[in-house]
């Protein structure tokens, strides 16, 4: 097993202050050997910080001419580490503001060496009184979003202290996102790349209530939540297709069908067309399935049949009970079934079982 103190440590930095040299001194005193510092376009007035890091602490300094974002800074460092230490177990990323102590960084490094195929997250305890309200609330929201939409149960989605295995570093070089959204993509892409996540408890440190952070809650949260758009677009667009076709078939076939089939036949016809559209979009774009088309299609058809039967039954019962309003009833029923269907598609239909 590799000496965990030799695992490369990546520190992206934008416009650092005196906390950076203090952190570097502590890291060197702790025996951490390979530190890669990324100057993400800080400007000439911050050059002394990086020059001191290289000369006094022996850091490798990589520079961006302009600010390109934390995601791009991490990718720049990943590429450097893969070329410089190709046999390393991976790397560790940490913030430059002192929130991650040397002891916590070493704990994550050791965990990576013990679990070389896992993405290791240094997770904080958000129940403390010293945690800023925006951090506690933001983490609670993103944890809920990850759990429902991605199927990942993570305690700290915003942590910057992470250990990334070498194989996953290569995959992440092609992952989307140049700024803070890249860290969310890093978590999401573990599903597609079948990378397990390991959580390691770390100290919860907030300096000046995190006022020096370059994370902007509104702007950067919008970027982060945008990565979930593909999950919602497929289902919503297929629902629109389904409802429009249902309305059309009701209008065209209403006078030709007996009352007992007035709801069922339009539901079946609309669902066949919208389900085909939804399957192809989900397979290619949303879940990026590695499952074979035959198996995935068979599971999807089984789900679609059950969902269609439930939709027809519930809409028919509610339609006769309410004596009308079939379109509004169908919208409500299908929204309810959507939440159930999404979970089943993510965990059963498109999920490829490793052999």
Image (cartoon, rainbow, N blue to C red):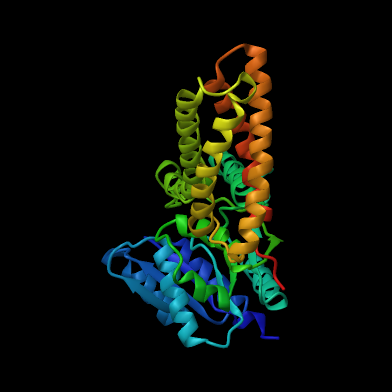
Q: Let me know if residue 129 appears in the view.
A: no
- Identified at 44% across, 29% down, the residue is 248
The answer to which of 259 and 89 lies nearer the viewer is 259
The answer to which of 154 and 77 lies nearer the viewer is 154
Q: Let me know if residue 304 appears in the view.
A: yes
The answer to which of 293 and 53 lies nearer the viewer is 293
> Along the horizontal axis of the image, is 188 left or right of 199?
left
* Quarter containing the C terminus: bottom right
Q: Where is 201 relative to 11, above or below?
A: above
Image quadrant assignment for residue 347: bottom right
- Identified at 63% across, 68% down, the residue is 195
* Quarter containing the N terminus: bottom right
Image coordinates of residue 71 in percent, x first then y, are 43, 63
> Along the horizontal axis of the image, is 247 left or right of 168?
left
Outermost front residue: 256
Q: Where is 148 relative to 194, above or below?
A: above
Image coordinates of residue 179 in percent, x first then y, are 41, 58
Image coordinates of residue 7 in percent, x first then y, are 59, 80
- Identified at 67% across, 54% down, the residue is 299
Q: Where is 42 relative to 243, above or below?
A: below
The answer to which of 119 and 111 lies nearer the viewer is 119
> Along the horizontal axis of the image, is 311 left or right of 61?
right
Image coordinates of residue 213 in percent, x first then y, are 45, 52
Image quadrant assignment for residue 105: bottom right
């Amino acid at each position: 097993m590799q000496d965990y103190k030799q695992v490369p440590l990546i520190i992206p930095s934008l416009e650092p202050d005196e906390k950076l040299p203090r952190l570097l001194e502590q890291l060197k005193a702790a025996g951490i050997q390979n530190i890669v510092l990324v100057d993400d376009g800080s400007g000439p007035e911050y050059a002394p910080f990086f020059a001191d890091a290289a000369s006094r602490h022996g850091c490798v300094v990589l520079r961006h001419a302009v600010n390109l974002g934390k995601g791009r800074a991490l990718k720049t460092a990943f590429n450097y580490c893969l070329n410089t230490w190709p046999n390393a177990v991976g790397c560790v990323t940490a913030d430059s503001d002192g929130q991650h102590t040397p002891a916590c960084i070493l704990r994550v490094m050791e965990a990576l060496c013990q679990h070389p195929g896992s993405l290791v997250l240094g997770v904080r305890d958000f129940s403390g009184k010293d945690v800023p309200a925006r951090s506690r609330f933001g983490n609670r929201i993103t944890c809920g979003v990850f759990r429902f939409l991605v199927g990942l149960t993570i305690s700290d989605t915003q942590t910057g202290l992470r250990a990334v295995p070498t194989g996953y570093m290569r995959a992440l070089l092609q992952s989307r996102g140049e700024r803070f959204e890249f860290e969310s993509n890093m978590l999401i892409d573990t599903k597609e790349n079948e990378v397990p996540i390991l959580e390691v408890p770390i100290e919860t440190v907030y300096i000046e209530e995190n006022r020096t952070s370059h994370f902007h809650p509104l702007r950067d949260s919008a970027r982060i939540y945008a990565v979930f758009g593909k999950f919602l677009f497929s289902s919503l667009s297929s629902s629109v297709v389904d409802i429009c076709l249902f309305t059309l078939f009701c209008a065209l076939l209403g006078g030709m069908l007996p009352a007992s089939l007035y709801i069922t036949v339009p539901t079946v016809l609309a669902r066949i067309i919208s389900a085909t559209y939804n399957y192809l979009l989900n397979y290619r774009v949303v879940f990026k399935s590695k499952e074979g088309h035959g198996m995935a299609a068979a599971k999807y058809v089984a789900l679609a049949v059950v969902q269609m039967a439930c939709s027809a039954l519930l809409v028919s019962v509610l339609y006769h009970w309410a004596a009308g309003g079939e379109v509004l009833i169908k919208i409500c029923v299908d929204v309810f079934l959507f939440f159930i269907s999404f979970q089943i598609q993510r965990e059963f239909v498109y999920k490829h079982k490793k052999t």
